[in-house]
Amino acid sequence: MNKVSEVGIDEVGRGAIFGPVFSAVVELTEKNKFTLNQLGVTDSKKLTPKERKLLLPTILLLSSDYGIGQSSAREIDKLGIRVATELSMIRALKKLKNKPSELIVDGPLLLRPWNGIQKNIVSGDSKFISIASASIVAKVSRDNLIERLEKKHSGYLIFKNKGYGTREHLSLIKKNGITKLHRKSFLKKSNII
């Protein structure tokens, strides 16, 4: 049995003004980290949507375990983005079969509710294949949801802007009003509502 070497976690959608924040955790062996690296797994932001979608099945197949969690726009408004992000990460971690002996977290912020060993790595998705894999799993999962939400919330170009506060998206909010899935706490900061 190949020793489990790395468990990485990452989030996506933290800065969006629409929809949930997603987190994913991926557990990889040394051998499978090498394979995914050879296949071009890197920070999801450096890949095209098509590349991410093509890599996703292989990541899921080669991961020893993985989990996906999310926090809703309502939870983000109620708890604040940091606590909601941590909640989505804990939800992802609870889906793993076993608690990791060490967790590698993308970014500088500690995952405060996690009572295990953790390492914070700034730009971890460029340095650790497990975090890069988690970023791809989270990004494709969130993009798939956003694509489905586009059908229910047309008139905001949600799929085009992925729920982020582009100038176009903000002008469409002014024109059409806000939906239940818009983050009111973020829009107040932008003086939209």
Image: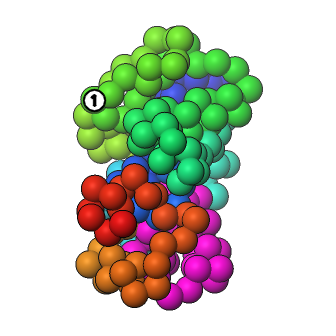
Quadrant of the rendering where the C terminus is positioned = bottom left
**Residue 175: horizontal and vertical position, in percent?**
40, 87
Amino acid carrying label 1: it is: Pro
Residue 136 located within the stretch drawn in magenta: yes
SS for callout 1: loop
Q: Is residue 119 above or below residue 26?
A: above
Residue drawn at (64%, 74%) of the image = 148
Q: Determine whether, in the image, residue 34 is placed left or right of residue 89.
A: left
Residue 169 lies, in percent from the top left, at 36, 78
For the residue pair 133 and 150, the one nearer the viewer reads as 150
Q: Is residue 46 left or right of residue 49?
A: left
Q: Nearer the viewer, residue 193 or 27?
A: 193
The one nearer the camera, 15 or 130, is 15
The region drawn magenta spans 135-163
Image mark count = 1
| Residue 53: quadrant of the picture | bottom right
Above or below 116: residue 69: below
- Position of the N terminus by quadrant: top right
Side (left or right) of 20 relative to 43: right
Residue 15 visible in the current orientation:
yes
Query: In the image, is residue 5 above or below residue 168?
Result: above
Residue wearing tag 1: 108
Picture residue at 49% right of the left edge, 26% below the top:
6
Q: Which residue sits at x=64%, y=49%? A: 60
